[in-house]
Each structure stands twice: as C-alpha cells, then as structure tokens.
Amino acid sequence: MPHPTRRFHVATLASLVTLGCEKPPEPVPEDPCPQVAMDKLAGDWIKVNGTKGDPNNRFRIKGTPGDYRMILIPGSQSRIPMVGEQREDFYVFDEQLAGTALQQFQDGQRQKNRIRVTPHHNSCSLHVGAALVELGSDGKEKVIPRTRGDDEYLTFPEDVELTFEIPTGFLFLGEAARSRRLEEAQLREFEGYPKPDIGFGEAIPVGVYTDAAADGPSGCTYDMDLFFDSRSYTGRRDSPSKAAGERVPAGAVEDGYRHWYVPAWFAPFSGYHLFEMHRYRTCSGTRELIEINGIEAMLM
C-alpha cells in the first residue's frame, strides 16, 4: 500500500496539472473548540481544578450574544441572578439587584457580585475571575477580587444532574409546612419570607399551599420532583425514600388550596441547605412545570 503522504503528493500533483499549475487554496483549519466562543456562552459550566470538577462552583448562561443572563452558584447553595455586558473579547456579569438590596448597594451598605468571563481557545475553556463590588462614599466603585487570577470552567457534563434555576416560590419547614395559617403568620413575621431556620432532623415536614385555580384545570393531575442541595432527593441512605427518582403526587385540594407536602424529609445535617420542590401539572398527557418552590434554610 502506498504511504499516505505519498498518495497526498500524487493527488496534489494531479490537481496542479488539472488547474494549469495553479496552487489549490489552503484548507480551512478545523476549529478545535467549536463550543467555546463569545457567541456560544449559553449553557452550563463547571469550575475545574486540573481534571477534577467542583460542582459547588458552577453557572448557567442563558440568552443570546449581547443579551446574556447568568445564574451563578458560587460555592454554596445560593443562586445569584447576573446580567452580562459585552466587552471586546470578554463579558462582565454583574449581580442583579432590586428593591431594598439595590438601595443598600447604592448607600454603600452591601456589596454585589461581579464575574468576568473570557473564552480561551487554547484550553477549550472559559477563564473566570470573580470579585465583589462596593460603592465608596465618593460614589466610585471599589472592586475586591475574590480569586487569585482566573479560574477555569468547562462545559457541564451531561451525565451529572444538578439544579441551577432560582426558585420563584417559597417552601415552609416544620409546623408551617402543614398549616396555611402558620404559613401566613410567618410571612407577616419575617417581612414576606418563611422562617429561615429550623433544627436539623431525620423527619422534617416540608411543604407549601398554593392556589389550586392558579395551578391549572381541575381535570389535570399534579405531582412534584424533589431536590436537596441541588441533587435529586433520595431520603435515608440505609432506607431510601419512596420519593427517590419518582414523581410525588400533590395533596388534595381543600377550600381552593392544594397542599404540596413531604411529611418527613431526611435532613440530619447542620448548616445552610437548599430544599426544592419542582411542581408539575399533567394535562392530556403533557407534563408541564408550574413553578419551582424552594428555601435555603439554616439547619441548627
């Protein structure tokens, strides 16, 4: 068999004769990283150290070039909304603040997150620098780096399931999870929020009441997927919950309210933890997400 390089030379010579000795155009080199570019940032990304990923540091970018939005998970269970601004060869994402939080930032009473994202073709990755920003008494920004240099982020692996989205509805823990009256009392006491802490335990009640009419038609069925600290809830290690990997049906409707309830959530861990309930309706065979309810609570 002729050497492959030799075959190439023969083919090239034949083409030169055919073209009247004109040199053929140079082939366009294949892009080694087609998924990494300023106009291809949308997707899920995870921080890496060498070959090891850090799932506690990740983000999701949505939208289109010039109008990107980010959901940042910066080493904890917190979900931070960010808005992007394009520069020459990188994007700057600033934390979205509103209401009291925005006023506190403008008064110099709180900081906001800032992320700088630069695509790097030589490493097929994003280089990401994190900082905190505060306003001085002179109204000028003071940028405080959170990282030494840039961290490296790669596209999130398809075989790993972690949640990214920011809950838009609340969950309640303990007695308030099974009493609409106590839910309303907590919202009054904590200025529109559920009580943010509870003792950790092996059987914590978790739930919320919702307006059944707002959920959808009465002829549909309603169920939920459960997540704890961004992963599918599996219950006890020695005796997995029936909720693990299954759709959990919603409770009955009473006085116009539907009860979404888990009577004994296994959470015997201290510290901040995130409870999530992804609520669905199924109408005519089509399952549709209604809302994500959640609470990041201190378990003491």
Image: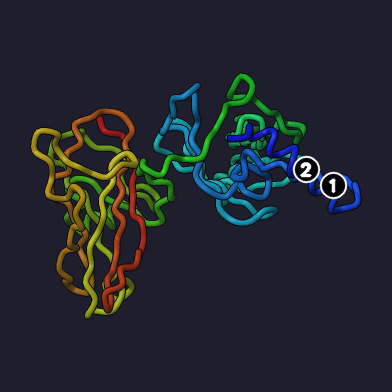
Nearest the viewer among 254 and 24 is 24
Percent across and percent down for residue 61 are 55, 48
Nearest the viewer among 191 and 47 is 47
Q: Residue furthest top?
A: 148
Residue found at x 9% / y 33%:
238
Q: Contact (CB < 8 A) between labels 2 and 1?
A: yes
- Per the image, the residue denoted by label 2 is 12
Label 1 crowd (10 A; few <14 / some 14-19 / many >=20): some
Q: Quadrant of the C terminus?
A: top left
Q: Quadrant of residue 219?
A: bottom left
Residue found at x 34% / y 42%:
230
Percent across and percent down for residue 20 are 91, 51
137 on left or right of 68: right
Task: State the mark number for residue 16.
Answer: 1
Callout 2 amino acid: Thr
Percent across and percent down for residue 90 are 71, 39
Number of numbered markers: 2
Percent across and percent down for residue 177 are 20, 52
